Amino acid sequence: MRGFKYAAGALAMLAGLSWAHADTLSTVKGQGVVRCGVTTGFAGFSAPDDKGVWKGLDVDMCRAVAAATLGDASKIKIVPLSAQQRFTALQSGEIDVLTRNTTVTQTRDTALGVIHAGVNFYDGQGFLVPKSLGVTSAKQINGATVCMQTGTSNENTMADWARANEVKYQPVVIEQFNEVVNAFAAGRCDVFTTDASGLASIRISKLTNPDDYVILPEIISKEPLGPFVRQGDDTWLNVVKWSLQAMIGAEELGLTAANVDEHLLSASPNIRRMLGVTPGTGKNMGLDEKWAYNIIKQVGNYGESFERNVGMGSSLQIQRGLNAQWTQGGLMYALPM
């Protein structure tokens, strides 16, 4: 009973926090920047380059929201957060939006005072091992030590999968992502498990000899990753959700950062509506009618962001796969405006 009362009290507190920040759009316009929670460094998704400029697929999501709300994709404040810090930072109002490779789950949408605003990367949990381990399947890691980050869904997924496949392992659970990577690189554990995109990033950007490691073929979960906002603020939820939809829809319509100006004269009703030539979509959200045009012009469409950050044009060289447009066999399907 005590536990139940505590849980109920915690939920009430979180609900109060979300209502305390129920006009995020006005706050963002007043402060002149969008404060985005990202990882502490995850190549391809959110990491600083050699000049200290944060780049990545999730940073582009942040930039898109800034372009939509403030007309300038550069008006962002990056707040690096660990997996354990991310939801507290959003709940408390420290950040305006969480754009940090975060899996959408029913519990997160219903019990934390936050809610997802779409999926910008479809992923799944996998396994990274040194080739010297001599295994070709995750089912061969019986008795291995497994590194993972605390505060993520990876812990429960790993436990469920191991139980179902009668695989015994010793978890090495560490809070800070970089410390987990260092532990794996130093040989403190035999296996690293996290989202497959994260494993690709770690292998290329964090390990001295990437060719000495291999990602095993098993994908043991569905990990739809996307931005989160606070519950109780539907206006801001719409802004973030439709900023992502504009990027996905722009790719479907063939709109790019390079050609979007030419399409301002398009006869297509869908393009005219998206670019604000036909007014309405901006007013509906309290934004300038060129909100989507600003996203496309300054950030690019979803495909452009994917390719330069994690795709074949990047060091990660991740295939589009499930993240391809629905017309190409993927799951990226833009909602109609």
Image (spheres, rainbow, N blue to C red):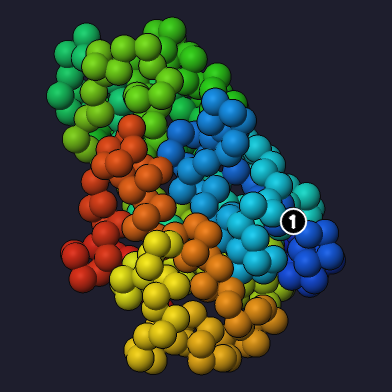
| Residue 221 location (% of width, % of height) | 33, 47
Q: Which quadrant holds residue 265? A: bottom left
Q: Is 315 left or right of 23, judged from the image as shown?
A: left
Residue drawn at 37 percent across, 45 percent down: 308
Q: In this view, does 221 lie above or below 19?
A: above
The local secondary structure at tag 1 comes to: loop
Residue drawn at 35 percent across, 91 percent down: 267
Query: Which quadrant is the C terminus positioned in?
Result: bottom left
Q: Which of 217 and 240 is in front in this view?
A: 240
| Residue 107 location (% of width, % of height) | 55, 58
Is residue 271 visible to the viewer in this orientation of the structure? Answer: yes
Q: Nearer the viewer, residue 138 or 4?
A: 138
Q: In this view, does 333 lie above or below 96?
A: below
Is residue 224 visible to the viewer in this orientation of the structure? Answer: no
Residue drawn at 58 percent across, 39 percent down: 54
Q: Is 311 left or right of 250, judged from the image as shown?
A: left
| Residue 76 location (% of width, % of height) | 68, 51
Q: Which of 96 and 111 is in front in this view?
A: 96
| Residue, disc 1 | 33
What type is the residue that disc 1 sits on?
Val
Residue drawn at 39 percent across, 78 percent down: 263
Query: Which quadrant is the N terminus positioned in?
Result: bottom right
| Residue 29 location (% of width, % of height) | 78, 67
Q: Which quadrant holds residue 269? A: bottom left
Q: Nearer the viewer, residue 91 or 165?
A: 91
Q: Is 46 left or right of 222, judged from the image as shown?
A: right
